[in-house]
Structure formats: C-alpha cells, structure tokens
Amino acid sequence: MSDIIRRDPRAEWIARNRLHPLHAAMQVQQSSWMGPNGVIRKNPHALGFIGPNGVKRIDRSGAQQGGSNKRSATVEVLLALHQVPVPAFYIAVAPDMVGGRLSSHDRDLLGLAHSLAGSDGAVLAVVFGEHKESNFAGNGVDRLLVLEGEEFAGYAPEQLVQGLRAVDNQFSPRHWLLPDSRTGGGELGRRFAAALGERPATRVWQVKDGLCSGRAGAGQQDLIRSVPRLILGAAECAEPVSETRHEALPVVLSTGVARHLARIEDLGPVAVDPAAIAMAEAEFIMSGGNGVKDWDLFHRATAALGATEGASRVAVDDGFMPRNRQVGATGTWVTARVYLAVGISGAIQHLQGIGACDKVVAINLDAGCDMIKRADLSVIGDSAEILQALIEAVENYRGDAKRDAA
Amino acid sequence: MNTKVISLVSIGAHPTSGRSRRAEQDARAVELGLQLAGDNLQVLHAGDPQEPALRAYLGMGLAQLDVLEQPPGADALGVLGDYLREAGAQLVLTGSQAETGEGSGMLPFLLAERLGWPLVVGLAEVESIHNGVALVLQALPRGQRRRLKVRLPLLATVDNAAPKPRQSAFGPARRGVLAARTVEIVEDELLEGAELQPAKPRPKRLKVIKAKSGADRMKAATAKASGGGGQVLKGVSPEAGAQAILKLLVEEGVLR
C-alpha cells in the first residue's frame, strides 16, 4: 500500500449521515466539551484533519470531513513459515557472499536447494567468516552454519575445503550446491569435488525430473545427466525463494575443522589502476555530473579514493569527461557495488544505468532530486566542500591504518 | 631461468562455426609459458596427433609439441599426471576449461589433487621465481589482482586476464614437429550415463510481480527505481558528511 493520503468518500458520507449505524463510531474526537466544573474544555489537537498533502487542515466552516488521521498503513505481508523440525536430509549450500551478503546468484541457488529439499529436507547454508546478511530467513535458509576463525580469513581455499569436509562429515548432505561463479564459488566447488572424489555437474542451469542440464564445452552443447551429489549452478539456475519464510536456525559443528598447512600464501590485494578497469565491471565508481564545478578536485578525489571515474551525460556533453565514461542508458550500464554520485540529480536514463548497483551514495545540493530517493546515503551540501573534506578524511584514515600496521 | 615449464593445450572450437581451432585460454597458457621459459617451454596435448588445429600452437614459435595419443572420449587425467611427474615439471600452465567435450574445468583441480601440488586459479602474471618460490599475481573479478606466494612445483590455470596470445604464423606451424607417443588408454565413464546435446537457449527470466492488489501492480509498473528509506544528511558540516561517506566505503570494503 502506498503512503499517499486519500479521501475516503464512504467515511465522509457516514460522517454526514447521522442516521447511519456507524456514524457514532466514526465520529472524530470531540474538540470541546463541558468540564465537571462547568468550564468548557478544549482539545486543540483533535481539531482539524490531515489533508491530502500531509498538512493539517482545520475546516472552520463546521463541515469537517470524517476519516481524519486515517492513513492507509503499509501492510507487511507475512509469508507462510516453512518449518523443518527434524530434517530427513540436508541440502547444503555454500554461497559466495560477495561483500558479506547473498548475491542474486546465491539466492537462485538457495531457490534450487529449496526445491530439492521439498518438505522433508532442510537447506543448510554454510557461511565462512563474518557476514552482513540479515535476510537468510527470507531466502530459504532452514539451517545456518557460520564457520568463523582467522584461518578462513583472506585467500585460503584449501582451508575452506577442510571446512566443507567437516560439514560433509557431520551432516552428510544429500546434495552440495555451490555457485559456479568467478567470485570464488566455482573454484571452491571444484577444489571440494576433487577432494571428495565426486564428479560434479558444472554450469548447471536446470534441474528437473531427476536430470540436470549444464552447459558443456564453450557453451555450444548441453550435458544432460542424472543429478549428482555436487552441483555447481549457473546464475539463474532456479527461481529464488519468494513465497515462504524460513527459520534460519543456527547450527554448529560438533568437531573442529582440521587445519590445512597453507601452501599458498596470500600477500594481499595489489593496487590496480582504476582507470584501466572497464567501467561495466568496476567495483567502485565515482561519477560527476552537472553539480561538479571543480573538475580538478573531482579527479583528485577519485584518485584519493581509488575509484573508477564515471560521468553523467551532461558532464560528457559539456566536454569535462570523455564519452566512454558516460554512465546511463546511452553509455555504460554499470554493476558497481558502490556508486558515488556527485552532483547528479538522477535522470531516469542515468538511474537505469545504475540499476544493478548495490549501494548508492549521493552528494547533491538539491534534497528533492531523484538520485536522493535512490541513494542509500545522501549528503546535502556543496560538492566541492564535501569532496575536499572527503579527501582529507581518506588521507587521515590511510594514515591511521598505516600507523596501526607499523 | 632453469624452471621447467609445461603448458597443457587442448583443441578448441570456434564459438560461432564450431570449427576446431587453438583454444583461447590454452593459447594464453602457451603465451605465458613462452614469456617465462622462451624456447625451453614444453607444450603437451593428450589426444589425436593428426588434428590440424594443433599446428596453430606450433605457429606460436614452438619447435615441438608432445602428444599423448588417445582416442576421443578417453580420460586424460591419469596419463597427464604420470607424464608430468616423470617429466619433472616445476610449473604447469593450463586454460581454465576446455571448449569441447564436457568442459567442466575439473582437470587442473584433479591433476593438482593427484600430484599433491598447490593450484593457483586465474594466474595473470608470474612476477618472480626465486629459490623454488614463485610470486604470482592472481586475477580476481572486477579487474582486481591479488599477490600470492607459492612454493613450486605449481599448477596454475589461466583465464582471460592472462596476456593475449601471439598470432600463429603459418611457416613455423608447418615446420614444427608433433611428437606423438602411445600411452595406456582409460575410458571415461561419464558419457555412458550422460548425453551431449546441442545447447538449448535458456529461457529468459521474466520479471514476475507478486502484487496482491491492483494499486501495487500499478505502482510496480510505473514507479521509478528507488532505494527507499535511504539516510539523508541535511544541514551537516562537510566534514561530518565526508565522515559518513567514508564510514560506508570502509564498511563495504571498497577503500583499499
């Protein structure tokens, strides 16, 4: 339901009609009455009604309309709770958790797991390290196993395989589902398959009637086979769970995870030139629009933040940015995880181009523009001052981090 | 450099015509091997030595290409594992997945498991090899790189982040030698229970709107994209605004 305040003609009609059975019940609160000592008491708050634009109106003509203070509240639809008190079997899913949250690929996979589990089995999600996801229950997770520990931090694929093996020993899931993605799931799933000695079905895009179809070779052929124990699912392999609510009960491993001697040492990420990353796949984009007056400052800010530069159409047309940096319907459709829009009011074409972005931050002078409505965090103010402050804040942050490391 | 480098190659298929060609990622593995080892690079293929597409690898400047002769449908894992162990390879490079057959991308993982070697996925660059320890750059999604330190012997797969393969020249491709050797043949049991079909186009996912009322459906059809309930900081100092933005960037982990 929308938040728009609407007239209720029926309530108004009842308020006018004193003979209506609901008339007394729907009368608005009295605004003045005789007190016990014969003094007229007034309730100034009961006077008037909330008008269609949310402003309080007082109708002094005496024909006050009924249905004051009545707003069509947003009704939260409570989905049916899917419970598996004693699971007959488990379907284990190890989601990617890009940025600590379930990606759409993970959600598709959980949907597939839910369909494989039916009503008797439970979907067990295995998550490594800390996560920021709050909606496991709404995405079809019946049991949630979080494996924490510093041994899983950084790039430790062999240790993750040990973790999955421990889960496999305790729960012996009927199926293991992993996303066949480049963000880790494809690699982890194959390592796990090699460790278990199972032959996985890869790039699976459909599981139906006990058969699973996956792309083979360079995508020119399909391999159709019976459903194996280990499935590496492609994106959109099934519909995500949307009709049920799940428990997401936390479970723990009864045994510790064997430590694997790390043969691959992670020396950390390497600084890459953000300008060399293709716009369509950059992770962090900072875009400038008409509100940016000082473009030198803008370039310095992107360099300080290590962001890939983008621009709105106006900035490109005015010659401040090259054409290949344009974000939007006619430019590049970006998939950044964090999109920082500076001085962009948010034309619909631009908003289309950032539709796939996860977090949008807006810096703008106009608090009423469309970009603010889309943004997860907006700062209203002059972009030059805020960018200058941001550069200083980032330098301070980097300085602190360096001092902590030393 | 005296590290023995072996690149594993397979037969590719052109994405449109399906004609056999040098496989894109395997060619990158050969290119990376050539940059590392030069003429000492050994290139290995398990399959049919008569295949003309193999000559495209020779055309990259190789004098010889070793072929373990196998019929199609045979399992290459065992013979490759045995060969690599005997050859004393220190660094083995392969593509991520084959362009023909199952193309599951499991071969490097199974080989690493069988040989007991560490495996690096998505190798982009070998920075240095010193005292049997390699410093390598691994390609991550979204154009990022990660530096890893691995002890040799090492198996590494390359994907499209590795250097572009050089063009194949006709003359060297003719002159090069395809050295075949016969090996034991192990049948792959996969295709007994599974079948390969021409790929079906995948159904496009429809945007299903599960609205209970007409007003909701109308809203879903007409509303602009909106995050809804974003935090708006109004009337704060630029420093406070910058701190709020910085906090979000740090939380999301995009600030390096």
Image: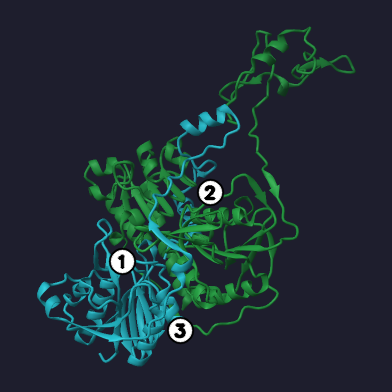
Same-chain check, marks 1 and 3: yes
User: Can you identify the residue that label 2 sits on?
Assistant: A239
Percent from the top left, x then y, of residue B23?
27, 68
> Is A27 placed above or below A154 here?
above
Q: Is residue A380 left or right of residue A27?
A: left
> Is B207 placed above or below A185 here?
above
Helix, strand or loop at disc 2?
loop
User: Can you identify the residue that label 1 sits on?
Assistant: B160
Helix, strand or loop at disc 3?
helix
Alpha-carbon neighbours of circle 1 within 10 Å: few (<14), some, or many (≥20)?
some
Chain A's colour is green
Q: Which mark is residue B114?
A: 3
Helix, strand or loop at disc 1?
loop
* Residue farthest to the right, as pictured: A36
From where the camera sits, is residue B131 visible? no
Residue under mark 3: which chain is it in? B
The kind of residue tagged 1 is Asn
Taking the spot 39% from the left edge, 51% from the top edge, the residue there is B200
The kind of residue tagged 3 is Arg
Chain B's colour is cyan
